[in-house]
Image: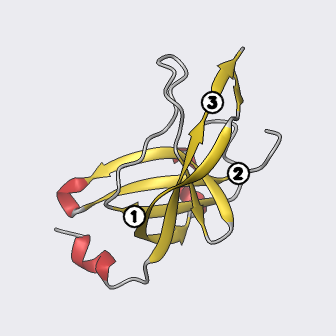
């Protein structure tokens, strides 16, 4: 079953990838650098159902989260390799990409974006 056509019937929102420069890890904590707008793409954005909270890493399950379906490729962080998570803006709210699901066989990828709360 190809879910791509079904998702195409849902309202799509504009999503902006946020580009950062100078982000680093310091003793396990992310130190943010500068930020600018990157690519803008469209996707289906839905609230993350409570029963899907297990998709989130521990410690991020209590914050506002969205389920994002898009063709654009995003990534989560991996401290071991130094890879930093992508951040996106939907409307005026920033979200960190906390989980990625490759659903390319259905024509899209599924992401969980956790609302950015400064100071955590």
Name the front one of labels 1 and 3: 3
Earlier-in-chain disc, 1 versus 3: 3
Earlier-in-chain disc, 3 versus 2: 3
Horizontal side of 78 relative to 7 (left or right) equals right
Residue 86 to residue 82: above or below: below
Residue 59, by quadrant, is: top right
Name the colouring of the figure: secondary structure
Residue 69's disc is 1
Q: Where is residue 19 in the image (x, y as percent from the top left)?
A: 54, 46
Residue 22's disc is 3
Q: Distance between the residues labelled 3 and 2?
A: 18 Å
Q: How crowded is mark 1: few (under 14 residues within 10 Å), some or many (20 or more)?
A: many
Q: Nearer the viewer, residue 49 or 94?
A: 94
Residue 45's disc is none
Earlier-in-chain disc, 2 versus 1: 1
Write the residue at 77% across / 50% down.
117
Q: How crowded is mark 2: few (under 14 residues within 10 Å), some or many (20 or more)?
A: some
Write the residue at 53% across / 32% down.
84
Q: How far apart are marks 2 and 1 (CA)?
A: 19 Å
What is the quadrant of the N terminus in the image? Answer: bottom left
Q: Distance between the residues labelled 1 and 3?
A: 28 Å
**What residue is pinned by disc 2?**
116
Residue 88, by quadrant, is: bottom right
Q: Where is residue 58 in the image (x, y as percent from the top left)?
A: 64, 36
What is the quadrant of the C terminus in the image? Answer: top right
Q: Position of residue 64 (x, y in %)?
A: 69, 59
């Amino acid at each position: 079953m190809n879910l791509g056509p079904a998702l195409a019937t849902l309202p799509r929102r504009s999503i902006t990838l946020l580009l950062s420069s100078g982000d680093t890890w310091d003793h396990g904590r992310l130190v943010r650098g500068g930020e600018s707008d990157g690519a803008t793409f469209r996707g289906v954005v839905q609230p993350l159902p409570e029963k899907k909270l297990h998709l989130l890493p521990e410690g991020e399950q209590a914050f506002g989260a969205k389920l994002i379906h898009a063709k654009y490729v995003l990534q989560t962080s991996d401290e071991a390799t130094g890879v930093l998570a992508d951040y996106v803006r939907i409307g005026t709210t920033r979200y960190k990409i906390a989980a990625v699901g490759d659903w390319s066989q259905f024509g899209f990828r599924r992401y969980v974006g956790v609302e950015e709360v400064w100071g955590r």
